[in-house]
Amino acid sequence: MADPVYKRILLKLGGEALAGEGGIGIDPRKAEKVAARVEEVRILGVQIAIVIGAGNLWRGQEGIERGMERATADYMGMLGTVMNSLALMDALERGGSVTRVMSALEMRAVAEPYIRRRAIRHLEKDRIVILGGGTGNPYFSTDTAAALRAMEIEADIVIKATKVDGVYDADPQKKPDAKRFDHLTYLDALSRRLEVMDSTAISLCMDNKLPILVLDMWQSDSLTRAVLGEPVGTEISDT
């Protein structure tokens, strides 16, 4: 097998990756499937950090639309990401991976506080690091948290794992003739408003020349093929 082209990756997962029936809650079996995909990459010698959302547990926008204060809704979402992080940690460790959960919100009983140099040290020791709590601040999405953490830990790429095999010019589930892109520039992704990641996250990656790869998490071997440099999904970069 070929050698990985990336030494260290930041894997961004939506909370839906762990969701149970109807896209809500946490299904331990789904967590096990995600863990198996991650372990396939780790055994290749790739260092892996993970940021996971909380859409399966809480959608802050719904609270805001019903009059909830934005900061409160965002903090609730951050707590949800820690719950998902613990579920994924459990699945990974039952599969034999050594894992650390680090949280931007201090909760020492369940997670280490996020400290950049400590996170890097864990990665160097072949531990999978799950980064919960978003950025620790309201008004920022977990996409932005993923971009920020990727730069802090000096990741080679942000891989956004979804249920779709790349970025399309329209929703392929609603428009069967939607066009899939193999590559986009950061400016294309921003100007076309393709909703790959929020504009803050894409802008952060653009300013720091950090590539983004969007792929289907559930497509067989897609994550493994991506780290081996095979053409998978849609890459967003400078050129």
Image (spheres, rainbow, N blue to C red):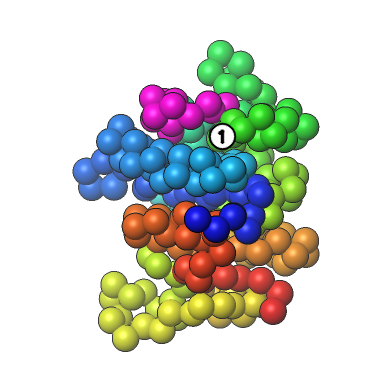
In the image, 78 versus 16, the foreground residue is 16
In the image, 32 versus 150, the foreground residue is 32
- Residue 153 sits in quarter: top right
Tell me where residue 236 appears, x and y as whole percent: 61, 70
The residue that mark 1 highlights is 128
In the image, 186 versus 154, the foreground residue is 154
Q: Amino acid at mark 1?
A: Ile
Residue at 65% of width from left, 47% of height from top? Answer: 8
Residue at 74% of width from left, 48% of height from top? Answer: 154
Q: Is residue 94 left or right of residue 195?
A: left
What crowding class fits label 1: few (fewer than 14 Cα within 10 Å), some (14-19), or many (20 or more)?
Answer: many
* Outermost residue toward the left in this view: 21
- Residue 171 sits in quarter: bottom left
* Residue 40 seen by the camera: yes
Q: Is residue 225 left or right of residue 103?
A: left
Residue at 56% of width from left, 34% of height from top? Answer: 128
- Residue 124 sits in quarter: top right
Q: Which residues are magenta?
A: 88-100
Task: From this view, report whether residue 190 is shown above or below residue 160.
Answer: below
